[in-house]
Image: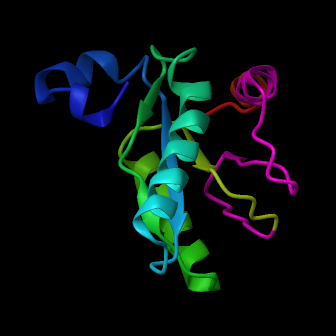
Amino acid sequence: MKFSDITEEQWDELKPYLDTCLLPVTGLGGGESPYEATARLERLRDMMDLVEIPFKGRVVTYPACHYITESESFQSMLGEWCSRLKQSGFNYVIVMTAFSAPALTIEAADLILQPGPDGQLLSHSEVSSQIRELWSAISP
C-alpha cells in the first residue's frame, strides 16, 4: 500500500495491521542521462513489486530517496529516517535498493533488500523468505 492511499481518518484503524514500512532508495548520483534514470527507476519498481504485491495488507511504501552519495553521512541520514519511521509507529523498516551496495549498513533498518553483487535481482521466494523471517524473529 502506498503512503498516499492512507487518509488521516484511516490511519488509526489501519496502523495495527500496517506495521512495516518499505523505504525505497533509487540510487541516482545526479549524472545519469534521462534513459539511465528511467532504467534505474524501472528496476527499483520491479524490486518493490516483490514486496508490495504479496504483502499489500501489511506494508506501507514511503516515497523513494532518489539521490545518494557514497558517504557515511548518507548512511547516517538513512538510519535517521528509519528511526523516525519507527517513532511514527512502524515496527519494522525495510530499505530496498535496485543497486548492489554491499557496504550499506543501516542499524535502524530491520532489513536491507538489494540485488546481489552480480546485479541479479532477488527472487520472489528469497524476498518472501527474508520478510517472513524478519516478522517471526523480531519482537517489536
Name the chief secondary structure element in magenta. Answer: loop
Quadrant into which the N terminus falls: top left
The foreground one among 85 and 71 is 71
The foreground one among 45 and 112 is 45
Corner quadrant of residue 122? top right
User: In the rendered view, would you say 61 is above or below 114?
Assistant: above
Taking the image as shown, residue 41 lies to the left or right of residue 47, namely left
Residue furthest toward the left? 9
- Residue 113 among magenta residues: yes
Corner quadrant of residue 69? bottom right
User: In the rendered view, would you say 100 is above or below 44?
Assistant: below
- Residue 134 among magenta residues: no
Q: What residue is shown at x 82% (from left), y 64% (from top)?
A: 102
Residue 113 rendering spot, x and y as whole percentages:
70, 45
The foreground one among 19 and 114 is 114
Quadrant into which the C terminus falls: top right
Q: Which residues are magenta?
A: 103-131
Residue 41 rendering spot, x and y as whole percentages:
48, 50
User: In the rendered view, would you say 71 is above or below 74?
Assistant: below
Q: What residue is shown at x 49% (from left), y 67% (from top)?
A: 80
Taking the image as shown, residue 5 lies to the left or right of residue 132, namely left
Number of labels in the image equals 0
Residue furthest toward the right? 118
Residue 101 rendering spot, x and y as whole percentages:
75, 64
Residue 3 rendering spot, x and y as whole percentages:
30, 35
User: In the rendered view, would you say 49 is above or below 62?
Assistant: above
